[in-house]
Image: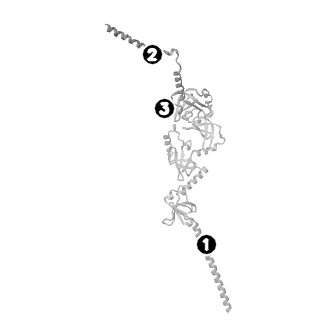
Amino acid sequence: MAQSTSATKSESGDLDSLVNEKTEEIKEEEKAASDEFVKAVEAQPIPQIGDKIKGKVLDFNKNEVYVDLDKFGVGVVRGRELWEALDVYREFKIGEEVEAEIVELENENGMMELSFKKTSKEQAWKELDEKREKEELITVKVQEANKGGLLASLCGIPAFLPVSQLSSENYPRVENGDSSKILSMLKDFIGRKLNVKIITVDQKENKLIISEKKVVFDEQKKNMKGLEVGKIVTGKVSGVVDFGAFVKFDGLEGLVHISELSWQRINNPDEVVKVDEEVKAEVIGIDDSKITLSIKRLQKDPWVEAVKQYKVGQEIEGEVIKLAPYGAFIQLDKDIHGLAHISELSQGKVAKVEEILNIGEKKEFRILSIDPEEHRLGLSLKGAREETSTKKEEDKKRPKKADEKPAKKKPVEKKATKKEKPKKKKKTEDKKAK
């Protein structure tokens, strides 16, 4: 009996010892886990004002969006910080991951105050660049207009549509390119909706450029099968602008630049073509935004033959047809014109071309250079003047002929005057004698 009691005590002691050991092990494991957790927490960067933080949408209403920030608690975006970002964050979904900027670590409700403004701008630029790459069709509402084009807004970012990126249908066709008239016509677009595509996205330069012309051109591509550079097309002039003429053909539309309308120099495209006039043109360029045509390349180049009658050094009369800051354009005949550079107008320095020449005035010029391939002919006004003045100097220095000596009779007249004096003395002597 005594032995049994002793054995029981021994077993009880062993159990207590085992329990104690196990308890110590658990405590050590808990301490190690706690230490690891503390280390992990300490290793985590503590959010600061201005930092960006990610979370999931917990709940939202028209005035507030609540964001689950995991171990950092709950954040809220509200008021101005929400409304100014709604162009990007138009729709919220529960559980959707969002990124925000910390405005305040803890507000009056114990939540982190957040803002979508800066993160939404970055997100907007990213989305817009994706739309550009995909060549996505976008509808914008014109908000403002200036002399350069139209202004709209995409995802809260100002977008610019240059005049040159308007479709030919909407391009302001103003005679002589009067900027005030162009602005007046552009203002008519305010409030209108246009289909556009993004062509430039530059966040660093804060530059977002859109194009209506690209939309039209991309639609034209469907009808461009078989169109290639060098092809001759027949169409009608659909519009005349200061820089050229638009021509519609086979469901397409191309541009004939003013320099491709005629071999002669022209000031206005309407000197050569009129709206609805039927014309033939050659396709000289196809790129991502336009088809380029030429009318003059289907015509014989008058320079090839006409320029043969002129030679370097030759003096010829020409009419001033245009003045520019760098010189004057001179018409030699109906096909050929040349340029008299400002440095070739006078021996002295010329401040303005208008000081020497006037439009419509005819003068003698000397030909300095001829380049038929480039359609260039250099003229000099001072060169012609120099030759004239040189001839006059040579005439002065040339020896006089025998029959040109009558001019030397003056000294003879002086001698005759001296001989008359003795006669006067003789009269005086006669008076004395009397």
Marker disc for residue 33? 1
Secondary structure type for disc 2: helix
The label nearer to you, 3 versus 1, is: 3
Number of the label disc, if any, that sits on residue 411? 2
Asked whether, in this view, residue 279 is left or right of residue 151, the answer is right
Q: Earlier in the sequence, mark 2 or mark 3?
A: 3
Q: Secondary structure at mark 1?
A: helix
Residue sitting farthest toward the left: 434
At label 2, which amino acid type do we have? Pro
Rendered image quadrant of residue 339: top right
Give the mark count.
Answer: 3
Whole-percent x and y of residue 123?
Answer: 56, 56
In the rendered image, the vertical position of residue 319 relative to residue 236, given as above or below? above
Residue 350 against residue 408 in the figure, above or below? below
The relative height of residue 35 versus residue 20 in the rendered view (above or below) is above
The residue carrying pointer 1 sits among few (fewer than 14), some (14 to 19) or many (20 or more) residues within 10 Å by Cα, namely few
**Residue wearing tag 3:** 355
